[in-house]
Image (cartoon, rainbow, N blue to C red):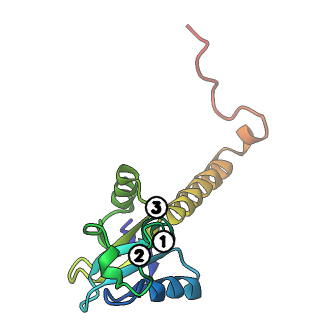
Amino acid sequence: MPIRDYCRRDPVTVDPGDSIQDVARRMESAGVGCIVVVDEARRPLGVVTDRDLALRVLRRGTDPGTAVREVLEGSPITVSDAAPVTVAARFMRDRGLRRIPVVDSDSGAIAGIMASDDLLQLVASELDACAAVVREQFPADLRGERALPARGGGA
């Protein structure tokens, strides 16, 4: 299952020269809590979240006219669109991320974004599909009858 099949396409992006205030307005108008800052080739330079704006920018008293590039911290962790979903899940778990930019495996340009909520929906969908198979294959067990032999208890 490559991540390109499950990530959200066309994430909201901004230029590094855009002001913090413009970034906040863009988040609000798009109804998102995360924006990817991209260069002219649309390669991710960083991610800014609503939490970043509240805790790192406002709390420090940063001028809202400051370019967003000035508040980016480190290089963004990204995942290739050809990578399995499990790779993104592992990166997110290991690094405590709620969102991860997905990049085109050839160009490195932003291709999408995967959020922890997206992963939860995917897992829920897969579990539902498994439950449907069990219901179909073992209806007697679900009615309380024994279609399968009981385990354990014998010697």
Q: Mark 3 to mark 1: distance in Å?
A: 21 Å
Circles 2 and 1, Cβ within 8 Å, touching? The answer is yes
Residue at (62, 56) in percent of width and height:
128
List the residue tagged with mark 2: 62
* Horizontal side, residue 6 vs residue 37: left or right: right
Q: Residue furthest left?
A: 106
Whether residue 103 is visible, yes or no, is: no
Task: Name the image quarter holding the C terminus.
Answer: top right
List the residue tagged with mark 3: 98
- Identify residue type, mark 3: Arg
Whether residue 120 is visible, yes or no, is: yes
List the residue tagged with mark 1: 58
Element type where label 1 sits in the image: helix
Q: Mark 2 to mark 3: distance in Å?
A: 24 Å
Q: Residue furthest right?
A: 143
Residue at (66, 44) in percent of width and height:
138
Q: Which mark is residue 103?
A: none
